[in-house]
Image (tube, rainbow, N blue to C red):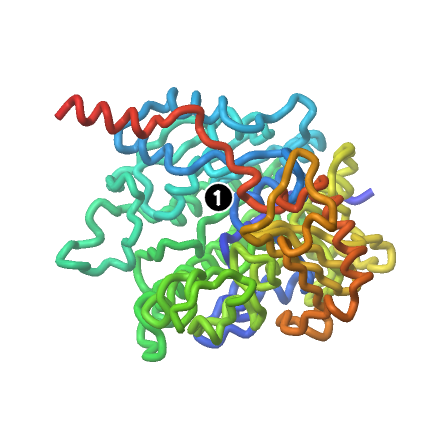
Amino acid sequence: MLRKPNVVYVFADDLGRGLLSCYGQPHYRTPNIDRLMRESLSFDNAHGCHICAPARASLLCGIHDSHSGGWTFTRAGVYKDMARGDITMEQVYELIHNTGVESRADDLFLPQVFKRAGYYTGQIGKLEWGFATSGDEIKGHGWDYHYGYYDHAMCHGYYPPFMFENGSVVTIEGNTDPDCGQDQYAGYHKNGEDMRAGRARYSQDLFDEKIDAFLQQHRQEPFFLYHPTQLPHGELSIAEIDPQVADDQDLTLSEKIFASMVIRLDETVGRIVRKLDELGLKDDTILVFGSDNGHCNYYSIERTGYFCLYNAKGEYMDHYRVRYTSEACGDVFNGNDGRTGCKTSNFEGGTLVPLMYRWPGHIPANVTTHCLVANYDFMATMGDLLDVDVGEGKDGVSYLPLLLGNEGAFKGHNYIVFASARGPALVTRDGWKLRSHLTENYKFDTFGAYWEEMEGKVALELYYLPDDYREERDLSAQQPQLVRRLLSALVKECDGNLINGTPQAHFAFYGYDYRREIEEQRHEKS
């Protein structure tokens, strides 16, 4: 029986593989993540989700993001209204707890798997549920300790006026902007305004301090620490441009800032590695590094227009007729690692993510596996490691045999499934990929739609990824029977309706227009 190790999971935000120098990034180095990859088993065929919130819910629940029900996403921004004094924390909780699909008594969440094995659980960073959450929800999922944001909209800035610690508001002295310092860029004057005003503490610095304290405090007991960082998600914001890129004449200002954000993430990884070494925990800890979804181009606005929406020609990218590539969008960093697609799409560039596991003496080092795995496999893998039954209704498959160097014992998936803004996709273990694109003519009813009802309303494309990693040669016309078979599996995974493989099917709106009420109150006061 293996000794149960500590587990630390660093979950990057919108980090495409091409942004790391271990995947060939030429403009800067990420030495700590590069080192981690050399000391790890890395996965070359790991898929996340297409956007942030589904990826976190999928990781937390052990199911893919294309089911009917399961979870819903409440709208972000409500805590910004709280920061402005327009709504109280009690009113925020009332909105969140009475909106959408709520947790059931028999639901099992990722931290509860660890708690059943006797672990202390901690979450530090970006919220782990929906687009707005509460301390009660997070506690109910099984976190013993949690610190960070409760609102995705606030996560788009890096200078929050407050954070939450175990459900209580913690004021961040010197940070006074309710928008959390969005568009802060890097300590320079913009339109005559000093962009540093009201922006004293950078959020990743706060997280690093809490991570250090957590590791120090719980070094004598088994722990699971989950760090969902904001980095390098936009808006662009950094305290100082990193010296690696400060004088690079080939980069624009926004590209230098974004590169500095990736380098800042690398510094956090290095800090965690050094802390584990200092505490003598290196050999007793599994360190995992991954990302929620693929690449998003926040930085080449000077070259292309608006990130991931328009290419360099000004054409709107629908990820069907007009597709995202680094060449078409002026992406000097090639963040999607040479693939087609970006965040929100079901091309590989939108969902293929870095994934590394280090556990000296147990997990092979400097080895890459090409086996197909998914974001929602983590719960099953940890359950297998800790001898905890994760129950029925999960989609994940344990890849513990891969971690222990026994690839022959890994059963794996026949296929994995993930959603996108315009429809779901399916990838098989031998590399076939069926992607859907729901047209504006697609209609659905309570019981979904039969294949013949989909004709002309759902575009289907078939790719063989081992020979076509850029997804440029659609083979659907040559392989109609394979398309039909994979479509049947995809519809089944979407619980009978492809629309479930879109985020639109999972958004829940608050029961009343509280913002209109805020505006009316302002009008009365004036």
Classify mark 1: residues with Cα within 10 Å, few (<14), some (14-19) or many (20+): many
**Which residue corresponds to the image point at 43% horizontal and 63% vertical from the top-left?**
316
**Which residue corresponds to the image point at 75% horizontal and 53% vertical from the top-left?**
487
Q: Residue furthest right?
A: 408
Q: Residue 175 falls in which quadrant of the image?
A: top left
Task: Give percent across and percent down for residue 287.
Answer: 62, 52
Can you see residue 525? yes
**Which residue corresponds to the image point at 43% horizontal and 31% vertical from the top-left?**
165
| Circle count | 1
SS of the residue at dot 1?
helix
Task: Give percent across and percent down for residue 498.
Answer: 66, 46
Residue bearing the label numbered 1? 211
**Which residue corresponds to the image point at 42% horizontal and 73% vertical from the top-left?**
330
Going by the image, does 322 lie left or right of 205? right
* Between 70 and 474, the one nearer to me in the picture: 474
Task: Give percent across and percent down for residue 446.
Answer: 66, 33
Amino acid type, mark 1: Ile
* Between 515 and 487, the one nearer to me in the picture: 487
